[in-house]
Amino acid sequence: MSVKLTEEMLSALPDARGHFGAFGGRFVSETLMDSLMTLEKEYARLKKDPEFQARFDKELADYVGRPTPLYFAERLTRETGGAQIWLKREDLCHTGAHKVNNTIGQALLASFLGKKRIIAETGAGQHGVATATVCARLGLECHVFMGAEDVQRQSLNVFRMKLLGATVHSVQGGTKTLKDAMNDAMRDWVANVDDTFYIIGTVAGPHPYPLLVRDFQSVIGRETRRQALEKTGKLPDALVACVGGGSNAIGMFYPFLADESVELYGVEAGGLGIETGKHAAPLCAGRPGVLHGNRTYLMEDENGQIAGTHSVSAGLDYPGVGPEHSWLKDIGRAHYVSVTDDEAMEGFRKLTRVEGIMPALETAHAVAYAIKLAATMDKDQTVVINVSGRGDKDINTVAKLEGIEI
Amino acid sequence: MSRIEGVLKALKGQGRKALIPYITAGDPHPDVTVDLMHTLVKAGADIIELGVPFSDPMADGPVIQLACERALVHGTSLRQVIAMVKEFRKSDDQTPVVLMGYLNPMEAMGYERFADAAKDAGVDGILTVDLPPEEADEVAPLFTQRDLDAIFLLSPTTTDDRIRAISEHSSGYVYYVSIKGVTGSASINVDEVAAKVGHIHELTALPVGVGFGIRDAETAAAVGRVSDGVIVGSVLVDTIARNQADTDQLKRALTDLLHPMREALDSLAS
């Protein structure tokens, strides 16, 4: 089933209570409700405030380095032998990933609201680094919560955050990964709600977070739309982006939702294979539930306990997904697919060798799927891959997988 | 009149305050939970809040998170928790039981099936930590249709408009979270609690139970003085953690903890 989305329908979502159809909402303990409602109100005001928007645009241009290029991957296209493959180069953003689009937006929001203390959760450390970076830039106190296991796996990013002046809290509870980091960030927020702003890194969490993160990340899709029209004279036929929480994908998809001719593909982490249960693909293999303040597709057991996840990519290793993706799946506007760890590694090697662009392992999932997809399409069609981040952070993981010591 | 309402009315008639202990079902083992519930009643509990373990208890501190983990190691499910209440009811049809937990296990079971099973087992109230009234349209009517009390939280950050709105959705009692923080964290400021609870009493006729930060007879009495009941959680759960190897010793330790609170609360009545 697929519905035609109009600008009018889209501007009405999320609704006043933060719902995207059956998904989203605000499922938090009472102590946070007042802060979330204040944030919602203030954001609605600042969204229309020319001073705030001008400041955001200036930061994106001069600090983040936007617009990022839309690049024609000529060799990859030739080797694939199908549709033209174009790359949206979010890996060229300051700090090496799209995450900073959102952190600069939320940190500015915190500054406008007079909050001096910032908290954030992080999995692989990219959102933590992006948050620590903008806190250094704006002179804000920064605390990053990170699962103890991820602290071990991503020691380089932990050191980067510390260099940037952030305090990194190693989270010992639960599975010691991203979801537990998010639990502890929420706990800190409840205890320090008066002076603290929580910068959530993805389009999940309680309303209004999925809305404001989408708005800040939508610059990706707006630029892509304009650049595609300039460079190819038409809209792309397909967009491909990886989906963990889903912030880079929603940023890319959102400005195209009303363009019926543009097919949207979100690529989840298939891990060792969906059939093994060891993956992080709630849209492909989960079911709706409530976690971290919103209703969305989740990986859970039959009793509603959140399941452990697996992915080669720490940034996709999360049991939930942004509620807007859940809605796009259910109305049939976007396709959600998965690729395995091995396929993603193949995508990583391919883009590195053929284009000289080393993608993040998260992004490598989108690359792997896009290559398969492009091969089935005509030569006059175009596919855009959102290259959400660069792969330097992953070289230790890649080396380990290949049995190399560095 | 619901069992909760009846108990709270009777206490009020006697000028007494409710003692409401919380334990996590399945902690330290599903086999001992019903036994521990009876122990709580013997030690002076008026109402029991029985925690439904959840893998990601975001509003709880480490003490209750660890309790959830201990319960989940043994696979304690919502269905089993309901079965424990049914078992408890075989020998106690007086003490109200409130299930306290997070929404997802209820959603996974199916709200209607959950409400039916809870009612059938003799559950009296449902407190869902991450379900504000704004999101309860679908769920709350299923509870009220079955005379299950829907209990909602109020906090230091709750505005007057919300206190009124939340009270309208509530029955049985409202649960005032005394501190900005998770369970078992900071110590409470009794003067602040007194002021806020006094204010809540002006806005709603429902009884007000106060939880978070009550750990001994002294804090129980101080909070009891300004509220209709005190909810005691983390200090009990911590006691369970420290005595999990020996059930008899655990029951004595829980009794030793609750008894002085009961006495301190009852001394307020005279």
Image (tube, coloured by chain):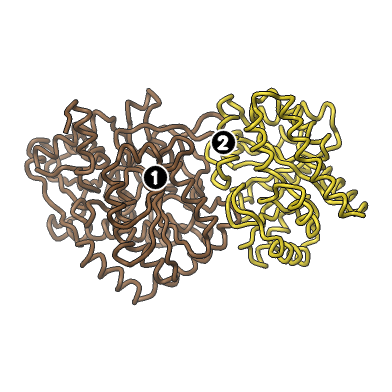
Chain colours: A brown, B yellow
Identify the image quadrant of residue B244: top right
Callout 2 amino acid: Leu
Tell me where residue A23 appears, x and y as whole percent: 49, 48
Is residue A316 visible in this depiction of the protein?
A: yes
For image coordinates 9% across by 42% down, the residue present is A355
Image-based side of A306 in relation to A258, left or right: right
Image-based side of B266 in relation to A95, left or right: right
Residue beneath disc 2: B66
For image coordinates 52% across by 43% down, the residue present is A290
Q: Chain of mark 1?
A: A
Q: Nearer the viewer, residue A259 or A264?
A: A264
Disc 2 residue crowd, few under 14, some 14–19, many 20+, Cα 10 Å: many
Q: Nearer the viewer, residue A368 or A119?
A: A119
What secondary structure is marked by label 2? helix
**Quadrant of the image containing the C terminus of chain A:** top left
Is residue B79 visible in this depiction of the protein?
A: no
Residues at badges 1 and 2 in contact (C-beta under 8 Å)?
no
Callout 1 amino acid: Met
Disc 1 residue crowd, few under 14, some 14–19, many 20+, Cα 10 Å: many
Residue beneath disc 1: A146
**Quadrant of the image containing the N terminus of chain A:** top left
Tell me where residue B109 appears, x and y as whole percent: 61, 33
Tell me where residue B111 appears, x and y as whole percent: 64, 39
